Image (tube, rainbow, N blue to C red):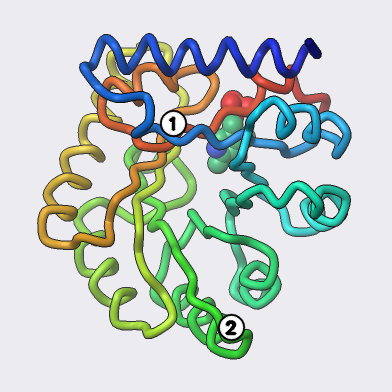
Amino acid sequence: MSDVARRLADVRRGIERACERAGRDPEEVTLVGVTKTVDADTIRQAIDAGLAHLGENRLQEAVPKMRALSDRAPVWHFIGHLQRNKARRAVELFDRIESVDSLRLGRALDEAADEIGRELRVFVQANVGGEESKHGVALDEIPALVDELERLPRLTVVGLMTIPPPRDDRERTRADFREIAGLFRSLARERPALQHLSMGMSADYEIAIEEGATEVRVGRTIFGERRG
Ligand SMILES: *Cc1c(COP(=O)(O)O)cnc(C)c1O
């Protein structure tokens, strides 16, 4: 078994443990392997060990890896900050875009999806940490933004995504997750398309699952520490 396959199995066990503690079914949690800075051969080992969803945060970096792995057809999630002038390229390349943080970006994505002739599933990126986290939409602005994005014909808002600020105190991270999970549940009650809550990374994915994540984005714990 390769190192990557072994670490992937460890993460899967971590997901199962967290689900057990929370009384949840592990089938409800999608593992997205974050492959920034990871080379295509290593990613291939993870895919061959069963990893079906991959996350990248830069278009330029993702393109050659997508080409190299096209025979494996993973589901690609865009998880980085997206500029409007790159919307078209992102729509061409990615299955999901998790970082929609404005109506203007949503419109650019919708237009690109229309030109290409496809439907696009997006997540709204929520800012849970206030000033400490750089990207994402303030929680009180999310309901209106979700509804405006839903009116765009080619977009479906399928989830919320968040990256809480790094905290020394894990209970504060838990409180961040709990806050966004509460908003997610209240929105989802009236919006059946909204099914995914993407939160939790290497350091905190078990806490995120305990608080209701349906998708965790894990990089280093599967692929090792990133260089540079
Ligand atoms: C890098 C990254 C991750 C994964 O972080 P790790 O600490 O390597 O697990 C998750 N989400 C986003 C948006 C990232 O940029």
SS of the residue at dot 1?
loop
Indicate yes or no: mark 1 CB to ligand 1 under 8 Å.
no
Q: Nearer the viewer, residue 185 or 7?
A: 7
92 and 146: which is toward the camera: 92
Q: Quadrant of the C terminus?
A: top right
**Residue 38: horizontal and vertical position, in percent?**
80, 33
- Image coordinates for residue 218, horizontal then vertical, percent: 57, 28
Q: What element does badge 2 sit on?
A: helix
Q: Position of residue 179 (x, y in %)?
A: 21, 35
Q: Answer with the quadrant where ligand 1 appears in the image.
A: top right
For residue 67, side relative to residue 221 (left or right) = right
Q: Does 48 sit above or below residue 152? A: above
* Distance (Cα) linking label 2 and label 1: 31 Å
Question: Could you tell whether 181 is left or right of 208 in the image?
Answer: left
Query: Which residue lies at the image location 41% right of the left edge and 41% below the top edge?
Result: 198
Residue that mark 2 sits on: 112
The disc, 2 or 1, on the residue closer to the chain's N-terminal end is 2
Quadrant of the rendering where the N terminus is positioned: top right
Q: Residues within 10 Å of mark 2 (few under 14, many from 20)?
A: many
Q: Which residue is mark 1?
A: 165
The part of the image, by quadrant, that contains residue 34 is: top right
Q: Where residue 52 appears, x then y in whole percent? A: 61, 39
Q: Is 212 situated above or below 137?
A: above
Amino acid marked by disc 2? Ala
Amino acid bearing label 1: Pro
Of the two numbered discs 2 and 1 in the rendering, the one whose residue sits closer to the viewer: 2
Q: Which mark is residue 203?
A: none
